[in-house]
Amino acid sequence: MSKLGRILGICGLVALLSVPLTLFLWDWQLTWVAVAKLAFGLAALAAWFLSARPRLGQTFRARPAFYGTFAGLFSALAVVGLVVVNFLAQAHPLRWDLTRERIFSLSAQTLDVLAGLQDTLEVRAFFGPQEPETESVRGWLERYRLASPRFAYELVDPVVRLEAVEKHKIVPGGPRVLLTYRGREERVRLGQVDASGPEEVLTGALMRLTQAGGERVLCFTSGHGERSLTGEDPRLSMSLWARDLEGEGFRTQALSLLEAREVPAACLALVVAGPAQDLAPDELQAIAAYLDRGGRLLALVGYGDSASLNALLAKRGALVTGRAVIFPEGRSPLEVVTDPQQYPSAHPIFARFFQGGSVSLGQLQAVLPMARQLSVHKAEGALPMLVLASSSVNAWAEADDVAAVDQVAFDPERDVAGPVGLALVGEAPQGGTRLAVFGSSLMACDAAYRVFPFNRNLLMNTLAWLAHEESKITIRPRLRAASLLRLEEADLKFITFLASDLLPLSILAFGIAIWQLRRWA
């Protein structure tokens, strides 16, 4: 009976210890197999305890058994503690994003959209476990779920769930993430190679699903060599900006004022982006009439662009000079960097960036290629204008034509010392009319729009303010920046000396010293 009890005890202990493995293999489901193992293990240990009870009393009265009991008890408590800690970590996860750009944290824009959800937003992502993109997609959806209790997602294996694939009409090569909210539906691509990041794609879809009202149309003038909304040339195309606008619920539309004769009432805002040729008088009259009836205009007028808008803008309070802005400390003297310390932090376009204490000013620098000087112009009937962005004191407005000279230098008698105005905004006192003027049209082109990240936020927030869409003024998803360590030749020599000479000799000397000390002892 004693031998049988021992055998049962061993089998019961093995059965109990294998229960967690069974639960893991069955995706932590309490199946009949796990229940049977648990019941058998407890019954077998009980049989062993009954058969060995007389000997156990004598054993536990010994000192080794006493200390062994406490050791086992503390071990069991440690295991229970680990289980509790893991359960709490699973139920209430905490994450820390230690990257400088906070690229693993959801942006303020995303958090605002999630906070505005009134009902549950359901997401179905058709990705199987064998696909390499699955874990990345799961990670992004999990971040959204943790940020809002009204965000729910499900990963659907398209190989196993054929009925779901047919029901939702998922096709190869098409969008594989389906978002549903209050009877409305959006489909997006995630995981595929794209210029937009996953957060931009998801948040853009959320904004389109949750926005109220009709279509939001932004009109871009055409017919005068303006920067194009499409195209492959990154120096002429604004395709990245146009895609961002469409991702946030706007519709971009090219507008020829020679054909339309007036700005349509459906336009939330009118954009004139770097016309190469002069606008006709009828077109300028149509823009003036649009502003007079409460319109919103964004003018991008850089150095070398047509000056036909200058008189109209001066009448509204924005003086566009013919001087190019020179910034000698930049990558190129004609790529002017804005000075964040000059920003009007209380203005809605910038208020979000200066909330919550300290801010990294280096991340708030926009770059305006081929910029010209802007200044506030006092005129009768002009809007109260405000300098939105300026250069640092190290820049200046050049009096000479920069295209006609090989080198430029600051002339205190003829040039205008910095800070130099680069962007102006103004609003009618009674509301309605809003005007924004930037001294560079190249800042919106693809070549500068994504290379200099703050250009994006500055343009998007300015256009949102113009369109009276203040809810869209926010900090957008961050882009990963390369962490570069620049080493001079002297630095490389020092590293070589440290790794190949100093460290090996130090270890050798330390070892010999310890060996001698032990001999002397």
Image: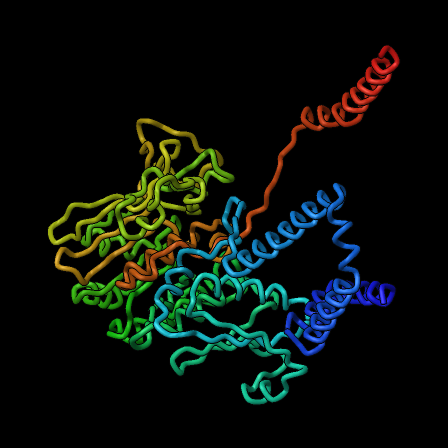
User: 86 left or right of 236?
Assistant: right
> Residue drawn 33% across and 34% down?
418
| x and y, in percent, of residue 254 in the image | 38, 71
Residue in the picture at 20% in, 45% down: 377
In the picture as drawn, the residue positioned furthest to the top comes out as 520
Along the line of sight, which residue is nearer the eye, 249 or 406? 249
Give the percent coordinates (x, y) of residue 232: 54, 64
Q: Is residue 383 above or below residue 251?
A: above
From this view, report whether residue 145 is shown above or below residue 491. below
Frontmost residue, 325 versus 224: 325
Q: Nearer the viewer, residue 180 or 290?
A: 180
- Coloring scheme of the render? rainbow
Query: In the rendered view of the protein, which quadrant contains the C terminus?
Result: top right
Residue 266 placement: quadrant:
bottom left
Vertical order, 360 against 477 (above or below): above
Say which quarter of the image contains residue 340. Answer: top left
Q: Position of residue 287 (x, y in %)?
A: 24, 65
What residue lies at 38% left-to-right and 68% top-to-bottom? Answer: 223
x and y percentages locating residue 8 in the rendered image: 81, 67
Residue 444 shows in this picture: no
Q: Is residue 407 visible?
A: yes
- In this rendering, position of residue 47 left or right of residue 324: right
Location of the N terminus by quadrant is bottom right
